[in-house]
Image (cartoon, rainbow, N blue to C red):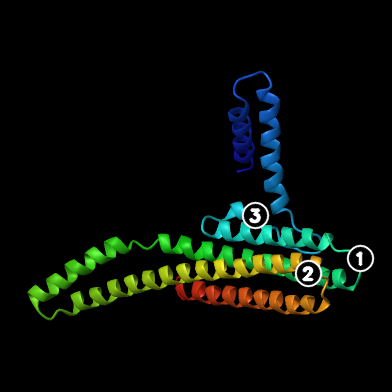
Amino acid sequence: RDRLAVGAGAAAGVLAVGVAPVALPVAALGGLLAYGIRVAVAIPRKGTGARIDPFAVGEPWRHAVRDAVQARNRFDDAVKSFKPGPLRDSLSAVSLQMEEAVEECWRVAQQGQVLADARKRINDREAAWELQQAQYALAQAGRNDVQAGRITALEAQLATAARMDALISSTKDQLDLLNARLDESVTRAIELSVSDKGGGADRLTADVGAIVDDLESLRMAIEEVDDAEAPGG
C-alpha cells in the first residue's frame, strides 16, 4: 500500500504539470508528499503505544479515523497558539484526552472492520431464497420436522445478518456524532484562544472526557457483539 501511495502522488504530479521536462521532479515530490502524509498519520504519538493507520481499515471506518486524527491535530495547533500560562497548561492536558479519543476511535474502527468482514461471509440472499423454498415445501407437504428445522436455521442466519447490519449502521452514526463533538471541541479551543476564559477550559476538559468515555463504551459494545457472533459464540 505504501508503494501505491507513492505512485498515486507521482501520478498526481504528472497530471498537474503535463509532459514537460519538469514533470518528473514534481511527480517525485508529489509521491514523497503522499507517502509522508501516510507515514505521519500512522506513526504512534510520543507517549502512546498505538500505531494508527486509517488505510488499514475500509470505509466507513477509515473516514472516521481520519476525521478524529485531523481533529486532534487541529486541537494541538490551537493549543500552540496560546500564550504560556495556566490556560495553555489546562488545554495541554485536554490534548492528552484528544489523543485518547483518537486511540479509542481507532479501536472502534478496527472492531467495526472485523464485524463488517464477518458480515460479508453471510450470504443472506441465498439464505432468503432457501427459506422461501423451504416454506413453500412445508406448505405443500404439511408438517415436516426436517423442513421446520431447516426454516428455523435459515431464519436464524437472516436474523444474525440483520443484527450485524443494524450494528454497523448505528456504530457508523455514533462515530460520526462523536467526531462532530471532537470538531466542536476544536472550535471551542480556538474561541478560548481569543477570549482567554479559564472556566471554558474546565468545561472543555469535561466534555472531551465524556467523548472518550462514550467511545470506550461504543468499543466495548461492538466487542461483545463480535464475540457473540464468532463461531461457537
Which label lies toward us, 2 or 3?
2
Q: Is residue 71 left or right of residue 147?
A: right
Q: Earlier in the sequence, mark 3 or mark 1?
A: 3
Alpha-carbon distance for marks 1 and 2? 14 Å
Q: Which residue lies at the image location 67% right of the left edge and 78% below the top edge?
A: 210
Q: Residues within 10 Å of mark 3 (few under 14, many from 20)?
A: some
Residue under label 3: 53
Residue under label 1: 84
Q: Nearer the viewer, residue 149 or 17?
A: 17
Q: Which residue lies at the image location 41% right of the left edge and 68% below the top edge?
A: 165
Q: Could you tell me if residue 157 is visible in this image?
A: yes
Dots 3 and 1: beta carbons under 8 Å?
no
Residue under label 2: 192
Q: Which residue lies at the image location 63% right of the left edge and 36% below the top edge?
A: 9
Q: Earlier in the sequence, mark 1 or mark 2?
A: 1
Dots 2 and 3: beta carbons under 8 Å?
no
Q: Nearer the viewer, residue 97 or 145?
A: 97
The type of residue carrying mark 1 is Pro
Residue 177 in which image quadrant: bottom right
